[in-house]
Structures are given as C-alpha cells and as structure tokens.
C-alpha cells in the first residue's frame, strides 16, 4: 500500500493549521501591542522557522540516509515531535536565554532586532554552504553583539556566556563519548546476531531514536526564541520580570519550528547523513540515542546547547568506534571551524545591524516617521 498520500495530507494539515494559528496570534499582537514589538516578534518567529529548516535537518539526516524513512516521512515525523515538545517540555532554557545572556534592563527592541538579523544572516550563509552550524549560538552571538554595540561589554552576563562557551566544547564531546559507548555496547550485545536481523531490528529502533532526538531538539531549541520574546516583552514593560512563559509564546515558537522542519534542509541532510561517515540503521540508532540523552540532560539543567554540535559529535563517536578511518576528518574539521566562527560572526553582523537600524530610526524620528521604541 502506498502511504505517501497520507504523509502528504498530514504535512499539509499541520502546515495549514500552524500557519492559521500563528497568523491569529500575530494579528492579536498587531492590535494590542506597539508596532515595533509586533515586528520583532514576527522576526523572532522567522528565526525559529529558519532554525527549523537549518537545525531540524539534523533530526532527519540519519533516518533519511539509512533509508528507514523517505524524506517526506522523515520531515513529518521530526516536525510532529518538535511540536509535541511544546506540551511536555520545560522552560528552563528559555529563562536562561532571557536572563542569563545579557542584562534585560540593557535591552530594547532595536537590540533584539539587530541580534535576530545577525543570527538569520549567519544561518542563511551557512545553509547555502551546507555547513551544520548552530542556530542557537548564532542567536546568542547576534544578541551579544547588538547588546555590546548599544551599551558596551557591561551589558553581557559573563557567567552565562561562560556556560554557553563551555558547552560548545562539552556538548559534542559528550555526544562523541556516548555515541562511541552506545555503539560499542550494541555491537557487543548483537555480536552473534545475523546482519539481516540486526538491520531489521534497528530500522524499527531508529524510528524511536529519531523521535527522541526530534523531541529533544524541540524542547531545547524552540525555547531560545521563547526567551528572546519574553526578553522583548520585559524590556517593553509588558511583562513582569519573572520570565514565566505564557503558553501562547510556547506554542507559536514550536509551531514556527515545526513548519520550518517541513520545508527541510536538504543540503545539510547530505553533509550529516553521508559526508562525515556512512551510516546504516544500527549506526543511526546509536548516534541519535546518544544525542537525545545529551539533549534531555542539558534541557533539564536549563543549558542552551547546540543540537547540531551534539548530533555531529555522536555521529563522529560512532564512526570512530567502527574505525578511525571511517570518519571523514576533513569534513569534520570544516564543521568545527564553522562552529568556532559562529558566535563572533553572528555577533559582528548583529552589532553592524544594530548600528544601521539605530541610525535609520534616529533619522526617521527626526522626520516624525519612526515608530516609538519601547
């Protein structure tokens, strides 16, 4: 039986519902909130949508490259579990992004606007190159750059940035160790099993591991945009500084990311699924399980980690377990260089965007055309 029409209908239904739901809330914002707040919220949702295209490709790369699911089935599968995380996840990471990166009182709508544009610009450039860099660190880099451009280094929360930079190193390292360990344990457990039986079993198992990884991706990554929107509402004096998330913010962020996932990031799928190391269902299961465990742990601790770094480390760890030559270290090194450059590059674009937008706003204000800042 050809189930492809069912998957297409499911994808269309989710896309239609998500678009209508998001537009309704944007309309509510436009009526009840200042214009600049509405513009920046729309831009934040645009970032989440790009994040779905860019980062959620990591969720489906292994399950597509191992041919467990078709690309259409994989994006619907990943989008569903990204969205489900809205109902079952926590908001610890959102509070960290809202209060632990820059001082909320030093932020205004132009800072957040500049930071988001910096992150989106870096995401689009690296998407074009097919490099799986971190949208999370692009967002944080853009926000930090715009904040420094406005008020200097004192606007940055040093301890929060230290934790984030530390986990740039730790999240892929933890993923690598877990990918290596899970691969080693599974290889020993199934050492006497027939290859055909192992392949059949892990084709089913990879559906679970891909779902777990997509859920972890949604529960960690969507929260970063939640934190940005909460920071915006606080800086606009429209929200108390407790950073408790209204559920409508949670839902529209997960919806935007889910819609981006349906579009898919096929350039990055190819890099993650075959260029680093060749994967079969057995390897895909081990890599996704290792990444999911890392993401669940970080989210529970409220640490905004990179899902990209985590899954890449897990794939490299499994490949190294088979043999070191199974990993294409040249591709892996290019990815690492992109990671290193993400925060400074997005920060530079965020600072430049803030200066341009602030200057343009000052000119428009002089002519009486500028929307009021809040």
Image (tube, rainbow, N blue to C red):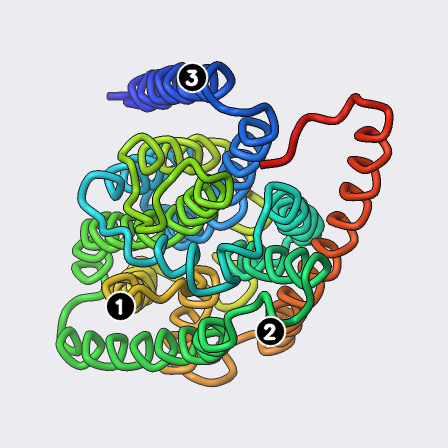
Q: Are marks 2 and 3 in contact (CB under 8 Å)?
A: no
Q: Which residue is mark 1?
A: 301
Q: What is the number of the mark on residue 28?
A: 3
Q: Is residue 261 above or below residue 176?
A: above
Q: Which residue is mark 2?
A: 336
Q: Secondary structure at mark 2?
A: helix
Q: Is residue 74 above or below residue 169?
A: above
Q: Is residue 295 above or below residue 263?
A: below
Q: Is residue 63 above or below residue 362?
A: below
Quarter of the image where the C terminus is located: top right
- The alpha-carbon separation of the residues under discs 2 and 3 comes to 42 Å
Q: Is residue 56 visible?
A: no
Q: Quadrant of the rendered structure where residue 148 is?
A: bottom right
Q: Residues within 10 Å of mark 1 (few under 14, many from 20)?
A: few
- The alpha-carbon separation of the residues under discs 2 and 1 comes to 25 Å
Front position in the image: 96 or 281: 96
Q: Secondary structure at mark 1?
A: helix
Quarter of the image where the N terminus is located: top left
């Amino acid at each position: 039986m050809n189930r492809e029409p069912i998957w297409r209908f499911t994808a269309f239904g989710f896309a239609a519902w998500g678009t209508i739901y998001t537009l309704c809330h944007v309309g509510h914002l436009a009526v009840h909130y200042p214009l600049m707040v509405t513009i920046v919220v729309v831009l934040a949702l645009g970032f989440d949508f790009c994040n779905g295209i860019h980062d959620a490709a990591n969720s489906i790369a292994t399950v597509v490259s191992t041919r467990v699911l078709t690309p259409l089935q994989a994006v619907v599968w990943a989008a569903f579990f990204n969205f489900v995380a809205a109902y079952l996840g926590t908001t610890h990471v959102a509070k960290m992004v809202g209060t632990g990166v820059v001082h909320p009182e030093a932020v205004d709508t132009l800072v957040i606007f500049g930071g988001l544009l910096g992150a989106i610009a870096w995401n689009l450039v690296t998407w074009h190159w097919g490099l799986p860099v971190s949208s999370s660190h692009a967002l944080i880099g853009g926000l930090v750059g715009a904040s420094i451009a406005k008020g200097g280094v004192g606007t940055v929360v040093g301890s929060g940035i230290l934790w984030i930079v530390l986990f740039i190193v730790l999240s892929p390292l933890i993923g690598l160790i877990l990918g290596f360990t899970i691969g080693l344990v599974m290889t020993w457990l199934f050492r006497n099993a027939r290859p055909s039986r192992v392949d059949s079993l892990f084709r089913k198992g990879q559906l679970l591991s891909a779902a777990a990884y997509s859920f972890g991706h949604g529960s960690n990554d969507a929260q970063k945009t939640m934190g940005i929107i909460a920071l915006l509402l606080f800086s606009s004096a429209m929200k108390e500084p407790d950073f408790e998330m209204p559920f409508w913010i949670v839902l529209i962020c997960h919806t935007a990311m889910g819609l981006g996932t349906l579009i898919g990031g096929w350039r990055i799928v190819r890099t993650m699924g075959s260029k680093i190391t060749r994967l079969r269902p057995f390897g895909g299961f081990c890599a996704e399980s290792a990444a999911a465990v890392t993401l669940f742990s970080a989210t529970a601790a409220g640490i905004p980690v990179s899902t990209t770094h985590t899954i890449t480390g897990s794939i490299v760890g499994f490949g190294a377990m088979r043999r070191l030559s199974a990993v294409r270290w040249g591709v892996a090194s290019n990815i690492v260089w992109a990671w290193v450059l993400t925060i400074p590059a997005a920060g530079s674009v965020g600072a430049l965007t803030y200066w341009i937008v602030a200057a343009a706003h000052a000119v428009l204000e002089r002519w009486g055309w500028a929307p009021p800042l809040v």
